[in-house]
């Protein structure tokens, strides 16, 4: 559980050195991280299958309880580096195949999920020292490099869906302005449509 210790150190730093016990008792992000770290340790262990499978079933039930009570879903198969920080609880979904580097922060409403078709289908790989702001959506086979701040700009799915293929090939700046910062199929709106 040494990775969980690095999480606590980061939480302490962000909370003006509140005691670890107070943080563990009152911080939903740490509840979710504890369950994830404990369950992930079982998942990665070399325990005999006869013991490992029942433990993973219990871990899954524990994860579901945390998901219901905190609104944070971190499957035990996710790969998260040290010093992970969840700024606020609620509506956080991380795909089971996601990879998140060291010293990353995420805020409430973040989705890190699967998207794309064929060879472009996949989940994000997030580097080290990344901050993902409130309500950000990272979906698809994308790589987020080290030392990045990613925040969600205003995006309207209905406006995206209403665009014709011609609009998407030759974007109208007025229609595309609200897509700034959005990622689809592993590319940002800027990469898909040019400078917005």
Image (tube, rainbow, N blue to C red):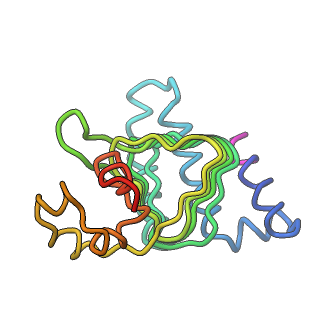
The quadrant the N terminus occupies is: top right
Residue at x 36% of width, y 73% of height:
178
The quadrant the C terminus occupies is: bottom left
- Secondary structure mostly seen in magenta is helix
Q: Is residue 77 visible?
A: no
Answer with left or right where residue 3 lies relative to residue 190: right
Q: Nearer the viewer, residue 12 or 112?
A: 112
- Residue 8, above or below 119: below
Q: Nearer the viewer, residue 163 or 46?
A: 163
Q: Is residue 10 visible?
A: yes
Q: Position of residue 156 (x, y in %)?
A: 30, 75
Query: Which range is magenta?
Result: 1-5
**Residue 115 in magenta stretch:** no
- Residue 15, above or below 147: below
Residue at x 23% of width, y 75% of height:
159
Residue at x 59% of width, y 46% of height:
37
Q: Position of residue 80 (x, y in %)?
A: 56, 43
The picture quadrant where one finds residue 63 is bottom left
Q: Position of residue 75 (x, y in %)?
A: 43, 50
Q: Position of residue 56 (x, y in %)?
A: 42, 43
- Residue 100, above or below 66: above
Q: Nearer the viewer, residue 186 or 166?
A: 166
Answer with left or right where residue 7 lies relative to residue 59: right
Residue at x 46% of width, y 45% of height:
76
Answer with left or right where residue 24 lies relative to residue 131: right
The picture quadrant where one finds residue 128 is top right
Count the marks: how many? 0
């Amino acid at each position: 559980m040494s990775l969980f210790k690095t999480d606590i150190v980061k939480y302490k730093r962000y909370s003006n050195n509140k005691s670890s016990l107070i943080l563990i008792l009152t911080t939903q992000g740490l509840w979710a991280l504890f369950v994830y770290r404990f369950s992930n340790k079982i998942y990665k262990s070399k325990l005999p299958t006869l013991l490992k499978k029942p433990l993973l079933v219990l871990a899954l039930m524990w994860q579901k309880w945390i998901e219901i009570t905190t609104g944070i879903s971190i499957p035990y198969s996710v790969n998260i580096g040290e010093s992970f920080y969840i700024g606020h609880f609620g509506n956080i979904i991380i795909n089971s195949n996601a990879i998140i580097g060291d010293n990353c922060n995420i805020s409430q409403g973040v989705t890190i999920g699967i998207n794309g078709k064929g060879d472009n289908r996949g989940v994000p790989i997030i580097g080290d020292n990344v901050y993902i702001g409130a309500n950000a959506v990272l979906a698809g086979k994308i790589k987020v490099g080290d030392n990045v701040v990613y925040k969600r700009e205003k995006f309207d799915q209905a406006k995206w869906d209403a665009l014709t293929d011609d609009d998407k090939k030759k974007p109208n700046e007025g229609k595309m302005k609200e897509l700034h910062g959005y990622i689809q199929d592993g590319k940002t709106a800027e990469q898909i449509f040019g400078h917005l």
